[in-house]
Amino acid sequence: MGILKFMHYYIICFSILIANVCFAQKKVNTQLVIFGGGASGTTAAIQASRMGVKTILIQETDWLGGMLTSAGVSAIDGNHNLPSGLWAEFRENLYQHYGGAKQVETGWVSNTLFEPSVGNKILKAMARNANLTILYNSSWQKVSKKNKDWQSEVIQNGKKLVINSKLIVDATELGDIMAYLKIPYRLGMDSQLDTKESFAPQQANNIVQDITYVVTLKDFGKGADKTIAKPSGYNPKEFACACADTLLSKKEKPDCDKMLNYGKLPNNKYMINWPKCGNDIYLNIIELNKKDRLLALEKAKLHSLGFIYYIQTVLGYKNLGLADDEYPTKDKLPYIPYHRESRRVKGLVTLTVNDLINPYQQENKLYRTGIAVGDYPIDHHHVKNQDAPKIEFIDIKIPSYSIPVGALIPKNTKGILIAEKSISVSNIVAGTTRLQPVVLLIGQAVGALAAIAIKNNQNPSDVNIREVQQALLNSKAYLLPYIDVKPSDKHFEAIQKIGVTGILVGKGKPNKWANQTWFYPDSSIKTAEFIRNFKTFMPIEFSSNNENLTVADFFSIIEIVKPSANTSFTWQQDIWEAATLSNFNLNRPIKKYEVAVLLNKVLMPFESKAINYTGNFIN
């Protein structure tokens, strides 16, 4: 290199260094990269790394948990009676921290309330794993496909990192990675012509749910005055009906204590996440860039601070001030707002409200591919947007439900999985799948699917669904939301396995704020019903009637479909005892749980017959 060329190169590089752009570029190889350390990104990282996959989690702040922690929504909605997988582990850690279940039943909106900072610490402890590297205070710049692998450019503390990986996961709050990659998605309300949901509007629109900049208040004691400065644009009329919104009848008086106790947290703190005349606000910022989002969110912050000022001055709670020991932010507000809605990927399948209401009557048997469960009603927040169609979403009655694995996989893009609130569900269904425990479980399923795809050197769409479901069962996670068969029950796994074959089915029903599906393990089953369901798995000729299926009837069916089972004079009793069942009697009605255990032991229908992503058996 000539002296002039050398000097020219030196000057350029020195100038770039001064601009803080020219730095050593570090390259790293890993197996899995997850964008977003929110609720599902964190559990996806935990699950995949526990399954032995080298994982890098990219998180913009120094907290984990997203809406659970960083957004301050630390009152769990739903799944209290479905203690599944990593959600159950997180809750148990909360119990241990606070001294038991009763110690987190502090507010009336939830059975589980906690301080956001405690949730963050627990998730960080759960995430400690030799296979998991978490890049805090990091942001992604570019993501591209290089041959069969992915290349992700990340900035952490001013330094560029280039990460090569086999697979990536979009667990961002708003589905930003899939938008960047131009993966097809939906945003806003669907047309009923598209989803075949009679509750949906005729025409699609881009209207999303109200967002909330949640505030965590702290009681500083009697006599304390923690009144904040009056926020710009403050209008007390916006909040005048806040306390009245607690009323159950016209005879009652507005109860402001009840409004505050809605989200009362341990250690005399309060989650302020109040709809209608509270701090909900309509802002559709999803398609904005990062800079414009932050500018728009200042309006949401001011609105929430206005509500706090109203609580302190008009309602007289001057002793309640912004918690000074929660968020390490300058304004003492959460890192991020509570986004109830995101972009939704166009996946291999789309879960609609029809699948929720009648899972067994649909052409596609998506329940057979279940990987996460939920029991919350369909809850949409649209009060602050006068242009939103007047749909009473909460009146759409559903039982508890399962999310299909195909909802996590984009239709036409390989090597990427979608998590958080961006999975392939209809807009209506997103009103229940958005809740914290469901999103935690979605992340766990994404982590399991990613780990298996990487280990088997497969694209996620080619993975054996039963292998993913087995990994989740190994983690004591529900595939189907049977409220009466817990993971601690002896026959939990067998019942779950037979349930997702459809040979035995549950019965769902709406139930206020905690919908249900029952298996009724100790009940009998009609012969005709059993034969009808069994034929969907395997053709069989057997005389059926509306009498209860007996132990003898069951073994007669086994004798037809698997003659090799009859190897001795006492073969029925031998199988019965090998399955660790008691009370052997050929003449009595057989119980549902006994059928499940025996089918799982003798025929192994879960393992022996594969299914596709629509839930249909593969011949």
Image (spheres, rainbow, N blue to C red):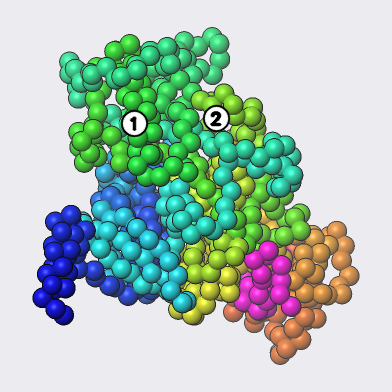
Q: Which residue is mark 2?
A: 382
Task: Classify the position of the C terminus by image quarter.
Answer: bottom right
Residue at screen point 47% across, 51% down: 175
Indicate yes or no whether the magenta region holds residue 331. Answer: no
The residue stretch that appears in magenta: 590-619
Residue 591 shows up from this direction: no
Residue 417 shows up from this direction: yes
Q: Is residue 93 above or below residue 562?
A: above
Q: Quadrant of the rendered structure where residue 136 is?
A: bottom left
Q: Position of residue 468 (x, y in %)?
A: 53, 69
Indicate yes or no whether the magenta region holds residue 598. Answer: yes
Nearer to me, 560 or 8: 8
Task: Classify the position of the N terminus by image quarter.
Answer: bottom left
Q: Is residue 468 left or right of residue 90?
A: right
Which amino acid type corresponds to the residue marked 2 in the rendered image?
His
The label number, if any, that marks residue 298 in the structure image: 1
Q: Is residue 322 above or below residue 588?
A: above
Disc 1 is placed on an element classified as helix
Residue at screen point 44% across, 52% down: 176
Disc 2 is placed on an element classified as loop
Nearer to me, 268 or 346: 346
Nearer to me, 89 or 395: 395
Q: Quadrant of the rendered structure where residue 615 is?
A: bottom right
Marks 1 and 2: CB-CB under 8 Å? no
Residue at screen point 48% across, 40% down: 340
Query: Considering only order in the chain, which callout, 2 or 1, is on the residue closer to the N terminus?
Result: 1
Which amino acid type corresponds to the residue marked 1 in the rendered image?
Glu
Residue at screen point 57% across, 23% down: 386
Q: Is residue 464 left or right of residue 77?
A: right
